[in-house]
Amino acid sequence: MSLSALFLLDAKGRPLIYRDYRGDVSTKAAERFIAKIGELEDAGRLSPVIHDDGVTYIYLLHVNVYLLAVTRANVNAAAVLVFLHRLVAVFRHYFEELEEESVRDNFVTVYELLDEVMDYGYPQFTEANILSEYIKTDAYRMEVSPVKPPMAVTNAVSWRSEGIRHKKNEVFLDVVESVNLLVSSTGAVVSSEVVGTLKMRTFLTGMPECKLGLNDKVLFEAQGRSNRQKAVDLEDIRFHQCVRLARFENDRTISFIPPDGAFDLMSYRLSQNVKPLVWVECLVERPSRSRTDYVVKARSQFKERSAATNVEIILPLPPDAISPQSRCSQGSATYVPEKSAMVWSLKSFPGGKEFLLRVNFNTPSVEAEEEVHGKMPPIKVKFEIPYFTVSGLQVRYLKVIEKSGYQALPWVRYITTAGPSYEIRMM
Amino acid sequence: MADGKGYFSTTKRGEIHELKEELASLDKLKKKEAVKKVIAAMTVGKDVSMLFPAVVNNMQTEDLELKKLVYLYLINYAKTQPDLAIMAVNTFVKDSQDPNPLIRALAVRTMGCIRVDKITEYLCDPLQRCLKDDDPYVRKTAAVCVAKLFDISPELVEDRGFLDMLREMLSDANPMVVANAIAALSEIQELGGKEVLQITPHTLFKLLAALNECTEWGQVFILDCLAGYDMADPRDAEKIAERVMPRLQHANSAVVLSAVKVIMRAMDSVKNEDLIKAWSKKMAPPLVTLLSSEPEVQYVALRNINLIVQKRPSLLSHEVKVFFCKYNDPLYVKMEKLEVMIRLASEANIDQLKEYAQEVDVDFVRKAVRAIGRCAVSLESAAERCINVLLELIKTRVNYVVQEAVIVIKDIFRRYPNRYESIIATLCDNLESLDEPEAKASMVWIIGEYAERIDNADELLEAFLETFPEETAPVQLQLLTATVKLFLKKPTESAQRMIQLVLSAATTETDNPDLRDRAYVYWRLLSTDPEAAKDVVLAPKPVISDDVSGLEPHVLQQLLAQIGSLASVYQRPADTFVSRQRLAVARADELQAVEHKFVEDDASEGGAAAAQAARDAGSSSGGAPAAAPAPAIDLLGGDLLGDAPEPAPAAAAPAAAAPPAAGLDDLLGGMALGGAPAAAVAAAPAPAPKAADPFDLLGGAPAAAPAAAAPQAPLLLGAEKGKGLTVHGAVVRRGGAPAYELTLHNGAAVPADGFMLQLNSNAFGLAPSNQVVAVGTLVPGAGGSAAVPLAFNPAKVAAGPATSKLQVALKTNQLGVFYWEDALPLPSVLDEAGTIDGNEFLSAWRALPQETTQRLGATVADIDAAKAALGAARLFVLAHRPVPGTGQDALYVTGRITAGTAPTQLLLELRLTRGAPGVDVAFKSGRQDLAPLAFDAVAKALGG
């Protein structure tokens, strides 16, 4: 686990900033890297870890900036990539967005951060909110007192500093479940999964001890509770580093001292079969060689008292579609040529309802003769259903205990959304 | 806020002069602005080293930000101004005692990054203080600094006892300090090749405790270190695995993967099947969840999952669905998911694969078609469905889909002979779309193999034959064989005409010796005994089996111990790609020209085609040319005599197919001087002066009395470590066998006796034939010498590539056991009669595919003396000739290792210019891993 150097490169591969940790890789590495990824991309063999001439390049591209780690050793590649993603988060915490301009404009701060997050190629400390206590941008440099490293940097609780004060002690907890789904062209659900995240925003004074209770099936069974309460079988859970993992392993208690502000407390996954919440069927007809009709049916398959909002159904059209027309029974449909798609938006989609959309368009008849290879991309669906979790997960309690003895107010919200790959394949 | 605005725009003339003035300004703000401008210039690559004194003058400042900038400047330019850099030392030392821990840490951190010899000395005292600092932030920084110092000067680290201090830090109350100490010790261990980090039950407990408390990165360090712990005892393994298990729930994917690594290791030593099952069950969900992380991390996870399921296929056998590709997955993720799907071959995959085969990306589509073929070959129950899917795909008439399908159908025919031939007709309808050699060759093979069932086989082949001269070699070979098959099966008039045509074309109009030879063999067979020809050409072929290639078990095991690392991503052992060595004080920019050449590149310089083939084979079988074994299907090569090497059939082939490099041409008197990529190779890996064999250096006087040699022999065990006992010695060759010559001196207060020697397993399997070190009893102040003869013991052969590493234990009755590490010089195992004649050398050199090269720093003025010196090391010079047009001399040198069961001949080519420094050595042998040792031996012999 030892990187030789870190580079931030612009989109063309010119170094914006580089920090050489070991002095065993030339600064020319950046040029070689850009040449190499060009070569690999042409060959269709690009990957995030590249080897060239004894040097390994591990990188990711964020907006228009490459974050590139260079090494000659057998480093922990997973750790390096996670570290680079963390670095993006740190920079975004400081500069709102990480892009060429923000790196150039803040190069002194970037250098300072690169000195602190990594030493001699070992990742050291990537908690943005603690870093900003001792590495400050110009606007905050005014204070006179000499900065010292916060205790948190080396503490067991490395994500929270002592002495935080809030007038009002509040905790906001959002349970966000996102559904990923793959439906085959024959209408069968090929795979589905639910990825849930507990997003927390805490405004708590001091060093609060928190305890979270969920309707966790494993816990209920261990406690021998009856099945009166609906429990959820969480397949896999991952916790923010503040959660005491050994304790959870022992007795399934979720206990932690939270960071101040926003963070993801935990994420979980269920791969049990989920009924598609919004079902879309698309019938394709070709009345003539140059004309195609879509008849699209969208159905909401959840309880009537819930309603999906901000629904978007994105229907792929052939790139050479000419003047697509649409009619729908609800919402509005617009043609988005740059995406080669018809986007059907519905502000609200109550449960147990069905709506219809018709699309027709022409294609150049000459090309229609020869079938263009490559299937159409799948239909994508986006939606949000507030006050609802597919899994049935519930927060039973959120206890906050602090030695000063204040009462904290927990606020819990639930929402289910379509995940990034809620896909229905076209016929 | 925006501290960078405008800094990057100044390009006017006189800028440097202006900066110099501003740096000397009395206005603090102006000064700081100037330093920022300097750093900005440095960032965009301008050389501002001439401002060194002016910038460093600003080092003593209250302004922390300014101080950091000056430090940054120092790190970058100290190397170019070593004398001026000394100016900075005072401030460093002062800063390392500053009341503010941030500044103390900053000073010690920065000093460690300045690789200037003179500064290094001054680093020791501040480092010693900081390692004991009250503030954990300073201690954790100092811990890393020890690793930095070790890279510059391992001697200093040992002399100053920093290693002991680091080890003490494992018991530090602060988890971050523990984690950094672990990281530093792990690296020092890896770099120095010595066991500096011995995990005792006590430290193990400390590590497991720190695991719960340190940052995510610290957890990764600790887990990676635990994975290297020898868990021979199942109870240990169980304890560790149980403590590590909760880490699987960590949000950081790297922590999860490292935890998986430790648990996989623990599984190997645990015997309890139920436990293994329970652990597998716990590991599967977190592994699946890794596929919800960022795509780059997914990629690493998938490469590792690929390894994990090779070892434990049942672990994820119920999770096939999670590897289905999503439309928006990046191509590299899709490709890796496909690889895993192939490993977890399941009928559920077929429909998915069919979908993928109709997507847009050509490479992905091709791989999907191949995957269908592999699925058919490995799952008999799925073969029928696969065939149907392939036929549907062929009907799409998409050119590259058809070609891939033909290739895999050929494989399926080989796996299930006489079952699916009914589809040949469909294939024959698509002949015109075949334009890639592999697809063409496959189709021709099918026609020849089933000629009797294809009515118009002769017409089809004839159509192919029209372009015979233009075809690539594999297609030509297939055409030749298929025509012979056709002729033997259906000796019609047209077949007769075709065979004459093809035989004459293949014997007279081609430059390809394989083709010509094969044609002659057929010709002779057919003309002398057609029945024998039938027996040979139409002999039944063995049925192929599952072609999903796995890694060699020992390679797999090695890679699994490094889950998450680059080795696991590349799927080849670390030593095949790690180019990192202790660079001492050298900087990369200076080393640009002398970097290690990666094997792949060497191959490509030698001969593009074969190297390309090697790479293709590598990437299709998982991107690991060096380690991946052959994907088992080798259809075209299956016929007896019938088929020649395919372009890239198997990953094992690339190495064998790599063309002879430039060195051979020279040997043959050629002129290929330009093609000496060999010249650019890094200096020898960490020099090991200890290993020097005094006798060999002196030109060979093996009979010299040990006592006389004693003063020159290197020190192996110092009095401090040896409780008063000192040992000098080296492994030498005496009377045709290796021996360990030792000179002992007892400086302890008590007499010592009962000296016994033992060696750890080593590259050549050497072990004492008699463990007694015959020096009798040594009273205090007395000394004695003895030579312990060493013999080959197969049980003592260390696994992996050869190294000179020799771990030695010496037991005494009174003082306990001492350990040291020595280097095993190659000449000690070289045979006195290890020479061969020139022709043998030449043919052996040609037969060996791979060569390793290195440039040694030695200067040779007198060739004859060099010959004698090499000969004394039993490296025999066979020939010496001038290299035309260069003024260089070439020496051809050989030696033989007899230790071990099979003697290994070493072949070397030395090129040098008399009197000028630099000797280029090219090395070839059946054991290419001996190269570093051979280079070392040559260097020693030549006095480099």
Image (tube, coloured by chain):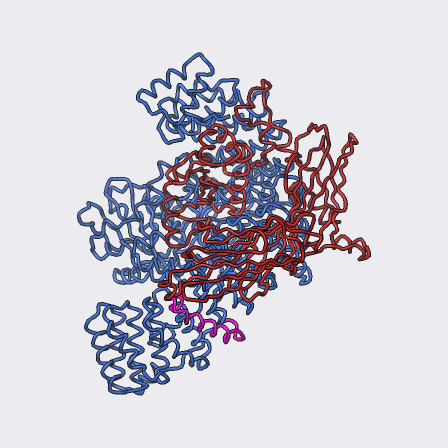
Chain colours: A red, B blue
Q: Is residue B397 magenta?
A: yes
Residue A320 spot, x, y in % from top left: 40, 57
Residue B621 appears left or right of A270: left
Residue B603 drawn above or below residue B453: above
Range covered by the magenta-colored residues? B378-403
Residue B938 spot, x, y in % from top left: 34, 48
**Is most of the magenta stretch helix, strand or loop?**
helix
Residue nearer the viewer, A125 or B752: A125
Residue B172 drawn above or below residue A292: above
Q: Residue furthest left?
A: B885
Residue A51 spot, x, y in % from top left: 42, 49
Residue B444 drawn above or below residue B271: below
Q: Quadrant of residue B399?
A: bottom left
Residue nearer the viewer, B838 or B829: B838
Specify the quadrant that holds the C terminus of chain B: top left
Q: Residue at x 29, y 42 (%)?
A: B918
Q: Residue at x 33, y 76 (%)?
A: B641
Residue A101 spot, x, y in % from top left: 45, 33
